Amino acid sequence: MTTTPRIAIVGGGPAGLMCARVLQRHGIEPAVYDADTAVDSRDPGGTLDLHADSGQIALEDAGLMDAFLALARLEGQAKARRDQHGTMLAAFTPAGDDQAAPEIDRGQLRTMLYEHLNPGTVRWGHKLVHVAPLGGGAHRLEFADGQQTEADLVIGADGAWSRVRPLLTDAAPQYLGVQFLDARFDAVDTRHPEVAAIVGDGHMFSTDSAGRAVIVQRNSNGVVRGYVAFRAALDWDVAAGVDVTDHEAVRAHLVREFSGWAEVMRPLITDNDGDYVARSFWALPAPLTWNRVPGVTLLGDAAHLMAPFGGHGTNLALLDGAELAHAIKHAIQKESSLEDAVARYEAEMFPRSGELAAGSNTALTRFFATTSADAPHLPPDHQQEHENYQARAAEYRRRRAAADR
């Protein structure tokens, strides 16, 4: 490759921004296009943990570990499992120096990545509506405002409903059968002390083994966010005659749905600040692969949308972005083709994401399964999980060092 390729990244989430950041560290200037009007124009959601063997490796590649640790919450790695009566079933408290999977707010992560890009890298307000092949791997991108651009490589980092994905595969997200209602508790330690006590410093998971659950977690600035979740058809609100924009109607429905839950757990279901935000969970078939199409590839949820159990989605998205950037850099340095770079990236991404996606989807199904009341509760061994993150991180670095020699 004798000239620097024109690279268009569609999507300004963690995957796209990470890819752009690592490319720029190697002197390659991509353009990022995102439908949002600004980095903070919408609610990005709650918190997430960045794993030592994936998300943190990408942050190291991006030169952003110090920036991450300045925002991260090590204590947020704490986890508790309770039943619907509030009885503690299992708990994990991380050691003070445990950095296997610290928490960071999603909005903080996105802003941090954006602020470390060169000015003008992200073109906000660019909603992709069509991608047209031009031959030889080049594509024309058309946006909702009528603007167009051309690129030698189109990187689809545009999430679950990717406009880029159909260039590679007919696979589409499938509904997982679980509805989540996003709830938020502000100034939790003073306004909702009973919620603060139940949640603790990190995550709290609770299920009644009858398809209902509450999953809540500490965010920064005294906020707790989480989900009131239950198995339901996609149109559950219509079937139940519930207007999801009517706070009181949703609350009344949840009181009936969770009537068997103890009073100590009730504030998590009914006392949230603001409206409930309805979310349905979808996943792509796993494992998902595709045949090479010149000049296009995918990152993150566009490539391997999965259930949120295990917290792998954003971690894989970040690693995808960093690895693709490395492959492109390597191709330019070695004067090999852009297609070689993308093939190298996909050969690593497919098996890694496929295994984790299948496991995450299975975990969600089991968590929301209907089981007998005396069925054993088997939460993960979080201490072992953290040790595994660190061991896999060390092995990853060894393998990459050997490959780069």
Image (cartoon, grey):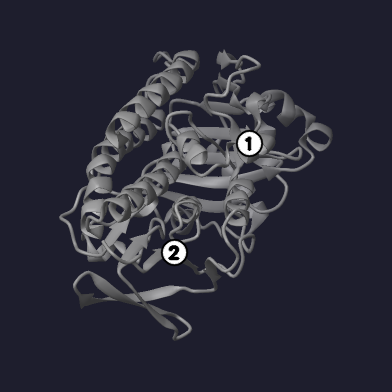
- Quarter occupied by residue 194: top right
Q: Is residue 217 visible?
A: yes
Residue 66's disc is 1
Q: Nearer the viewer, residue 300 or 1?
A: 1
Could you tell me which residue is drawn at 41 percent across and 22 percent down? Answer: 394
Which residue type carries mark 2? Pro
- Quarter occupied by residue 232: top left
Which residue type carries mark 1? Asp
Q: Would you name the residue on which mark 2 appears?
A: 30
Residue 133's disc is none
Give how far across and how far down residue 193 sits, in percent: 79, 29
Give how far across and how far down residue 69 sits, in percent: 64, 34
Image side of residue 402 versus residue 195, left or right:
left
Give how far across and how far down residue 129 sits, in percent: 38, 76
Which quadrant is the C terminus positioned in? top left
* Label 1 packing within 10 angstroms: few (<14), some (14-19), many (20+): few
Could you tell me which residue is drawn at 21 percent across and 53 percent down? Answer: 340
Q: Nearer the viewer, residue 157 or 355?
A: 157
Q: Is residue 175 visible?
A: no
Q: Who comes first in sequence, dot 1 or dot 2?
A: 2
Q: Secondary structure at mark 2?
A: loop
- Quarter occupied by residue 400: top left
In this rendering, the answer to whether 249 lies above or below 166 is above
